[in-house]
Image (cartoon, rainbow, N blue to C red):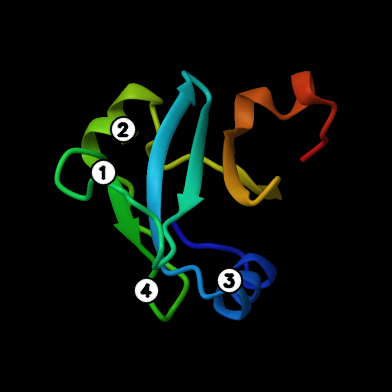
Amino acid sequence: MEFPRPIRQFCDASGWTLFHVVMLDDDRLELIPVLGQDDSDILHEYHSSLSGEGKLWIPMVLRELVCLGEQSVMVRIEEGTIRVYLRKVFKTLGFGP
């Protein structure tokens, strides 16, 4: 997945390069930044690192669970995390593409 420029710039400014990836439901993922002081279990949880070009690899297991293939997503920063919404939920959330 490639982050839009404003999201990428926010991540750069905030020092967010590693994310704990959580499936919220069939239509949403949450990317929680892993900071230096966090006690995160890197070996037993899903994590992804952000490339310098703003690309984030989502683990295959999670991509299959949320049907995240070659479809459009909406990416928002919400409450200190990044949320990824699949296109099919845009309208139900009140967002227009």
* Residue found at x 39% / y 68%: 36
Q: Position of residue 42 (x, y in %)?
A: 21, 50
Q: Position of residue 89 (x, y in %)?
A: 66, 24
**How far apart are the two marked residues, 2 and 1, measured between alpha carbons?**
6 Å
Q: Which mark is residue 21?
A: none
Q: Which residue is mark 4?
A: 51
Q: Residues within 10 Å of mark 4 (few under 14, many from 20)?
A: few
* Residue found at x 26% / y 43%: 59
* Residue found at x 72% / y 30%: 90
Q: Identify residue type, mark 2.
A: Leu
Q: Which residue is mark 1?
A: 59
Sequence order check, earlier mark of 4 and 2? 4
Q: Secondary structure at mark 3?
A: helix
Determine whether label 2 and label 1 are within 8 Å by CB: yes
Q: Which mark is residue 62?
A: 2
Q: Which mark is residue 8?
A: 3
Q: Secondary structure at mark 4?
A: loop
- Quadrant of the image occupied by residue 91: top right
Determine whether label 3 and label 2 are within 8 Å by CB: no
Sequence order check, earlier mark of 3 and 1? 3
**How far apart are the two marked residues, 3 and 2, measured between alpha carbons?**
21 Å
Determine whether label 3 and label 1 are within 8 Å by CB: no
Residue 11 drawn above or below residue 73: below
The total number of labels drawn is 4
Sequence order check, earlier mark of 3 and 2? 3
Residue 40 drawn above or below residue 3: above
Residue 26 drawn above or below residue 94: above
Q: Identify residue type, mark 4.
A: Ser
In this rendering, would 49 be left or right of 23? Answer: left
Q: Quadrant of the C terminus?
A: top right
In this rendering, would 52 be left or right of 59? Answer: right
